[in-house]
Amino acid sequence: MASDRGRQDDENRPDDENNPLAEFMRQFGIQPGADGRFDLNDLMGSLQQAMNQFSSQMNAFGSGSEDGLNWTFTKDVARKVTAAQGADPSPTPADSQAVRDAVGLADLWLDGAMTFGRVSLPAEAWSRAEWIEKTFDVWRSLVSPVASSLAGSIGGLMQAESQEMAGLQPMMEPMMRAASAGMLAAQIGQALGQLSTEVVSGTDISVPLTAQPRVALLPANVAKFADGLDQSAGDVRLYLALRETARQRLFASVGWLGPQLLALIEHYARGITIDASAIEEAMEGQLSGEMTPDAIENLGNEVAGKLFEPKRTPEQEEILARLETLVALVEGWVDDVVSDTTASLMPQAGALLETIRRRRATGGAMENALKSLLNLELRPRRVRDAANLWAAVRAKKGVEGRDAAWSHPDVAPTSADLDDPLGYVEHGHAQLAAADEGDDLDAALRALLDEESGRGEQDGPGSGGPDDRPGSH
């Protein structure tokens, strides 16, 4: 029976990857007894050994960070989840050349469709594993506030009231602190691994994930995206290269945009609090019965759910609304730029845009991954409205007028402007023009003051300067 269960568990391993507790126990070799059950005392001893091993790994890898997570372990889980989804070969020289050719053509086409210059770094082709490596530092900074919140919430978790658990409390608190950190690390790794199988480019989720703007495509995921479409693989690659190149040019040229997107996500994450009592309740309910592998799996699902079931605060709701609007503006701008660029050059672009919109509307793996990572249900519902707004501005003010709206966050469109794009064409650009005029006046005033200051320093008191000349008063 136990061996049959073991074979069945092995067959179901890909699904099991979604259970952070099961993944954590597998990583440290915690197994049931010969009868297929866990003895509670034996389980506690095994967990204690796992905690010691986990802590040793944290120290060995220098991962005992303030947030309490072993990020080396997290990355390892992400890589394993990626590998479990199928082959992930490194891009061949031909793949890299195809990406560079597509991005080179995209740059030529986009030069006349926007005012933002080209990205300085060369285009690259990435495997899924390379996407994890190259974006991991940014993900760590975004998710770290959640880990810190977890570390601060576990302190009172194991103040168990049940007689069965009360005697174990002294050792359970530090164990659960480490176990919860291990489960969160596993859950983050699983989410990143799953996300790596879906993204087609470096900024596919509309957020800059590398230290410097760089156009990058994932050939394996581009091929997966193109599967079943009527368009050729080359056309799909070119279309995705156009979108990624436009997005990276925007982030490279608008200095406030990328930092503000990341700051909003980090601010949102800092507001996440872990309900320790809900986790305790879930654990007590599961640990009160037989300690079978199924019970452990159910416990993992319960705890994982409780880790990311916090209620949003009013402040988080406001941040999420701002973030969704900003992402909608980015993607709507990309839609308008690429549609304008391809209007006479790529007849099939309209069908590909609809494919992008359907993918965006369904959310799918990318939305689930962000939910697991940050409890962030980021689905910008107003991308079409944003695209219509940018098209209206371009029709009235030209490409220069459209792109000038990114010059400062105070003059960029707002959620209210998406309701009235024609109104923004009028009053929004009047505000931009007024800001420009104000900047010009400020610059002229500063120049005048600098000039007067220079004269004062040169003339000095009583040196025969303008105010000291006879008849000057």
Image (cartoon, grey):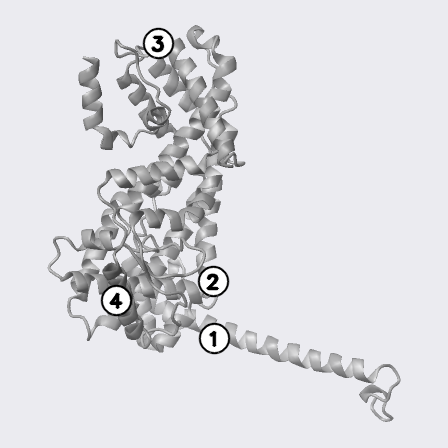
Most distant residue in the front direction: 93
Lateral position of residue 247 relative to residue 236, left or right: right
Front disc: 4 or 1: 4
Q: Which residue is under mark 3?
A: 39
Of pointers 2 and 4, the one earlier in the residue sequence: 4
Residue 90 visible in the shown view: yes
- Residue placed at 42% from the left, 44% from the top? 317
Mark 4 vs mark 1, CA separation in Å: 37 Å
Q: Which class describes the residues within 10 Å of circle 1: few (<14), some (14-19), or many (20+)?
A: some
Which disc is residue 102 wearing? Answer: 4
Measuring from the top left, give residue 243's x and y in whole percent.
29, 63
Q: Which residue is under mark 2?
A: 409
Q: Which residue is under mark 1?
A: 433
Lateral position of residue 135 relative to residue 351, left or right: right
For badge 1, the amino acid type reads Ala
Front disc: 3 or 1: 3
Q: Secondary structure at mark 2?
A: loop
Q: Which class describes the residues within 10 Å of circle 4: few (<14), some (14-19), or many (20+)?
A: many
Mark 3 vs mark 4, CA separation in Å: 59 Å
Q: Secondary structure at mark 1?
A: helix
Viewer-nearest residue: 427 or 281: 281
Mark 2 vs mark 4, CA separation in Å: 32 Å
